[in-house]
Image: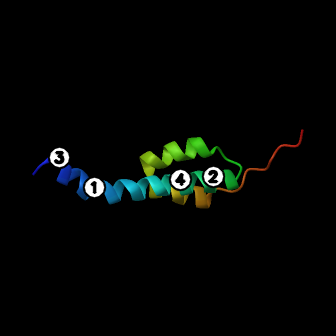
Amino acid sequence: MDHLSTFAGGAPWFVGWGTLALINAALAQGKNRSGLLWFLLSLLAGPLATLLLVLLPKVRSKMF
């Protein structure tokens, strides 16, 4: 088995995981949380990060 066929077989998995991380970043920003932090966390935890984001309440914005 060569390296190209190994990469090609795993490419959809990487694309899906990366797309989920982008969706989680947008979801986090919608809840007034750090999109970058949740993007990075999602790269590591994937669907578990999505579950946490769904369950966590929206952070109240601070009035200055």
Name the disc covering residue 59, or none. none
Determine the secondary structure under disc 2: helix
Q: Earlier in the sequence, mark 3 or mark 2?
A: 3
Does residue 37 sit above or below 49 in this rendering?
above
Label 4 or label 2, whichever comes before in sequence order: 4
Does dot 1 land on a helix, a strand or a loop?
helix
61 lies left or right of 31 = right
Tags 3 and 2 touching, CB below 8 Å: no
> In the rendered structure, which disc, 4 or 1, sits on the residue that comes first in sequence?
1
Label 3 CA crowd tier, 10 Å (few <14, some 14–19, many 20+): few
Lower sequence index among marks 1 and 3: 3
Label 1, label 3: how far apart the Cα atoms are: 11 Å
Q: Which residue has dot 2 on it? A: 28
Furthest residue toward right: 64
Residue under circle 1?
10
Q: Residue at x 64, y 43 (%)?
A: 34
Q: CA distance from mark 4 to mark 2?
A: 10 Å
Question: Residue 3 has which mark?
Answer: 3
Which residue position is annotated with label 4? Answer: 22
Give the CA separation, mark 1 to mark 2: 27 Å
Q: Residues within 10 Å of mark 1 (few under 14, many from 20)?
A: few
x, y percent for residue 40: 50, 42
**Which residue is depicted at the point 56% across and 46% down?**
38
